[in-house]
Image (cartoon, rainbow, N blue to C red):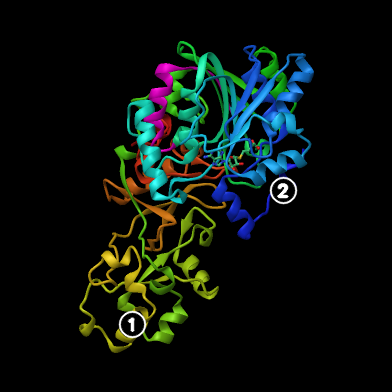
Amino acid sequence: MTHYKEKLPAAGPEREALRQKGQFWTPAWVAEAMAAYALGGGAGELFDPAVGEGAFFRAARAIEAETGRQVTLSGREVDPEALAGASRNGLPESDLSRVELADFVLQPPDRKFQAIAANPPYIRHHRLPAEVKARLKALGANLTGRMLDGRAGLHLYFLVRALALLEEGGRLAFIVPADTCEGVFAPSLWDWIARRFHLDAVVTFTPEASPFPGVDINAVILMIRNSRPENRFLWVRCLRPQTPALKAWALSGFQDAGEGHLDIHKRSTDEALSTGLSRPPTQTCPDGPVLGDYVRILRGIATGANEFFFLTVRQAEERGIPGEYLARAIGRTRDLSGDEVTAGDLHALDAAGRPTRLLNLKGIPADRLPAPVQTYLRLGEAEGIPQRALISTRKPWYKMETRPVPPFLFAYLGCRSARFVRNRAGVLPLTGFLCVYPLCQDEDYLERLWQVLCHPQTAANLARVGKSYGSGAIKVEPRALERLPLPEPILKEVGL
Ligand SMILES: C[S@@+](CC[C@H](N)C(=O)[O-])C[C@H]1O[C@@H](n2cnc3c(N)ncnc32)[C@H](O)[C@@H]1O
């Protein structure tokens, strides 16, 4: 097999084309483990609904060679180019003869399968044409009896469709991004799955062991059987890249311990579903204290056009915009390196030519603004800024969202892991940050709360509420951050 890493363009139009088609090939060490599970119930056929260059077909042949059991291959694919790649990668025509060039989700096969393995196209909802999205939504409702949230990507519909095509006792192995377990649509989807199917195992990967190195996707393998649900399953964390232990564990019917390579836990499905299947088991009591008991969270200011509203000191001076129409602000998480932002940090950003001044005209009518500001607004108008999506809903168009200065910020997605930041510079954050507003403004209270927010145990709990990415980064939405469990001993220690 051509190695995945060699095939992946890092950026540019080629990478964009991959995104549009959702083409990320599964490496052999993962595909073989998945095929071993799917075929492990004795199936004589493996079906792949998104064949691509045939990673699971090659994996099935490898399992056949190891177990001596004969397997027929069948599948679906929409891209003839990808199938040509499968031939080039050494799959004989006889292996590809049962692959139909058709859409798996919208024109599904008319029979069921004993074994399904897939790496479905990861195409997020905003990349799907509106008409396709509407058909998918109707299909989801039809198959599951409930509406899936509109933010569900194509991979979720692949999963739902494949589960519905699983024979009684049949097995399915899907490798999906963690948002399948963490997204807004997850509770409804998993409620449906958990009531009808038997979850055998979930395999997660540490950032070092990622099956897709260089792609910021936190991948999870789901191993599901069409039989009576049970409240027990195996949750595995794969610790070593390209480890043969994963396949050995699947081939052994989950008997192998994968010593040093796999971290295996028996978990209750109920607990795991409430924690999130992609996350490690929790011992936190579900009624324990959470951040929302102490603070309210709002996202940072969305300007709609940072290049116009968010200026460097120099740009503001050159335009002659008076200081009273500028608020100190911070835009990128990368502009902050520590756990605090101070006046000194802002000076350093100014010196480095980074923007720190937000045009804040508070809805004052244009004819009452100083002449240089009026000139600048006219420039924005000439550039079509008032017609931009978010801005066109504002009146007047240059009116900025208002936020009180938050005492704490939360850097929710950055190259350094997500963290709280003490705002000692009185800055307003833009959308790279969340604003954290304590329910009590007392200075002593703020200091105590800060002790809790910057505690490593609090940081460790972020994984329980955030969406994780392949690199280990975590993104946390405002409502999810309010559900962040706070360590009780630390709260006691600081007297909160
Ligand atoms: C993530 S790739 C996985 C390919 C291969 N099974 C693997 O694991 O390496 C997903 C494949 O699904 C194909 N695909 C996209 N939309 C599809 C659809 N609606 N029906 C069937 N295949 C589709 C893409 O062309 C792509 O080759």
Comparing labels 2 and 1, the label whose residue is closer to the camera: 2
- Name the residue rendered at 52%, 70% in the picture: 348
Q: Residue furthest bottom?
A: 371
Q: Report helix, strand or loop for mark 2.
A: helix
Determine which residue is flagged by label 2. 7
Q: Quadrant of ligand 1?
A: top right
470 versus 147 height, above or below: below
Residue 129, image x and y in percent? Answer: 43, 50
Q: Quick one: label 1, few (<14), some, or many (20+) residues within 10 Å?
A: few
Identify which residue is drawn at 55% across, 43% down.
469
Q: Nearer the viewer, residue 341 or 374?
A: 374
Callout 2, which amino acid? Lys
Is 196 included in the stretch rendered in magenta? yes
Question: Which numbered marker is on residue 322?
Answer: 1
Q: Amino acid at mark 1?
A: Pro
Marks 2/1: CA–CA distance: 53 Å
Q: Which image quarter is the C terminus in?
A: top left
Residue 458 covered by magenta stretch? no
